[in-house]
Amino acid sequence: MLFLAAIAISVGQCVPARKPPGYTVIVDAGHGGRDVGAPAVMPRRYEKDVTLGIATALAKQLSLQRGLAVIMTRATDRNLSLVQRRRVISSCSPDLVISIHADSGPSSARGPSIYVLNDAGEAIVVSRLTRSGRSVDHDDDTAYILANLSQRGSINFAYELASKIRIALGQEEGNLRAIRTANFALLKAPGVPSILVETGYVTNRSDANKLFDPNQQTLIANKISSAIASVRR
């Protein structure tokens, strides 16, 4: 694991695999390296640059919160597979996962979108938790009930936090798009509240101007960090 000297942030898998002390948040910067993500409206600008900038600013802000450990899946422009990202999550047993992305679409489309796990994804995770929870003390029914309670609690918390982030990011221009659900792989960490934040559209000129501006990246990160601080458990 690589440690960034200036701030209390670590990068990569937890070795040995264990939960760091304190409340642990994994900040995932989407894409990276040869996986550039969505191309922006400006030439030679890509989603991967937005996600790393905002994720780095978010990690710095979170590291200032008392009793909070921050782990980034990547801190440089490097390619990181979905499997590698999931290994970071599983090795560190975090309390929360925040994945940062930027959207693409018609040039008129703009504004942030917040995603949490949908019902299909929840069923998959509950199945995994049920298998891992079976023991001589728990029959299949008990293991299922415990797994379902664990995952439902995680999703409820994710919804609560997603609502806070939605308001914080959308209030500036009254852009309060409803919270969305999806079956994204990074939202399926068993028992871990997980949120994917599409911070805006790199294919919209107004959004892109903000998303590639370091000052605006810091502002977006501050809003997400404040939302996390308001609901930490």
Image: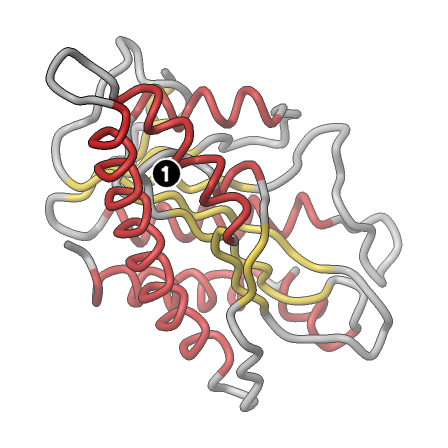
The location of residue 116, given as percent across then percent down, is 48, 56
Left or right: where 136 falls relative to 101: left
Question: Can residue 7 be seen?
Answer: no
In front of the other: 193 or 66:
193
Q: Which residue is mark 1?
A: 26
In front of the other: 163 or 111:
163
- Packing grade of label 1 (10 A; few <14, some 14-19, many >=20) is many
Left or right: where 44 falls relative to 95: right
- Residue at 58 percent of width and 63 percent of height: 199
Above/below status of 126 relative to 197:
above
Above/below status of 150 relative to 84:
below
- Residue at 16 percent of width and 22 percent of height: 138
**How many marks are shown on the rendered structure?**
1
The location of residue 104, given as percent across then percent down, is 77, 60
Question: Can residue 199 be seen?
Answer: yes
Query: Element at badge 1?
Result: strand
The location of residue 134, given as percent across then percent down, is 25, 18
- Residue at 42 percent of width and 31 percent of height: 127
The location of residue 185, given as percent across then percent down, is 56, 37
Q: Quadrant of the C terminus?
A: bottom left
| Coloration of the structure image | secondary structure
Q: Which three-letter amino acid code belongs to the residue tagged 1? A: Ile
